[in-house]
Amino acid sequence: MKKISVRAICFTAMFAAIISALSILEIPTPWGVPFTLQTFAIALCGYVLGKKYGTIATGIYVILGAIGAPVYAGMSAGFGVLFGPTGGYIIGFIFMALFSGIAYDFFGKKNAAGVLLTIVFSLVGLAFCHGLGIVQLKNYYEMTWAAAAMAGTVPYLLKDIISMAVAFGLAVAVRKALRAANLLDWEKK
């Protein structure tokens, strides 16, 4: 059994808290469903922590909200949210963190090809997130696929892509600083 460093546990917990804090902040929109910084936080988590710890941190966030901590958008919580119209997106965050982490772990190098592959692979994670969200939204409201996509994905897609790009840029700087301070010990395992 591999030993997990205290530092990896602390960073995982810290990122679960960051996701929680950035998820409850809402920016109102004209179409009624607010923007949040969830996508940014999830992508940043995957890019900084990598596939293993980024996915664990996101899973902790999902579990915290499911058991009643008000960490979902608008300070909502509970299994009712997970089984409600937006629950598919919340479950999809786990896949988004996984794919963002895989992307950075394998492709997140400084050359242009590595950055391009990171972006492409991260977009696959975003597609999983939106795909699960559309499925649940469609089934919950018994709407068409097109109507579900228009209601839950189309208005947010550009914001989500920009959020992921900004998260990638910030993650590069954060990882550089952590590496310089010799704080990325979980990478060596």
Image: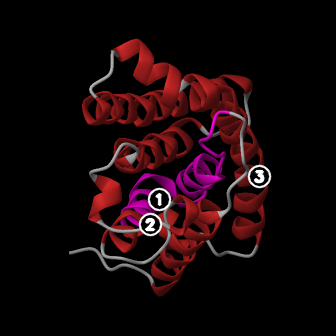
- 34 part of magenta stretch: yes
Q: Position of residue 20 (x, y in %)?
A: 55, 68
Judge left or right: residue 32 versus residue 139.
Answer: right
Q: Secondary structure at mark 3?
A: helix
Disc 1 target residue: 54
Q: Is residue 158 above or below residue 129?
A: above
Task: From the image, tell me which residue sits under label 3.
Answer: 170
Toward which corner of the image does residue 2 lie, by quadrant? Answer: bottom left
Residue contact at pointers 3 and 1, CB within 8 angstroms: no
Q: Is 13 one of the magenta-colored residues? A: no
Are dots 3 and 2 in contact, CB under 8 Å?
no
Secondary structure of the residue carrying numbered label 2: helix
Q: Is residue 27 left or right of residue 14?
A: right
Residue drawn at (43%, 48%) of the image: 93
- The one nearer the camera, 84 or 9, is 84
Camera-nearest residue between 167 and 177: 167
> Could you say which quadrant of the image residue 136 lies in?
top left
Whether 8 is drawn above or below 130: the answer is below
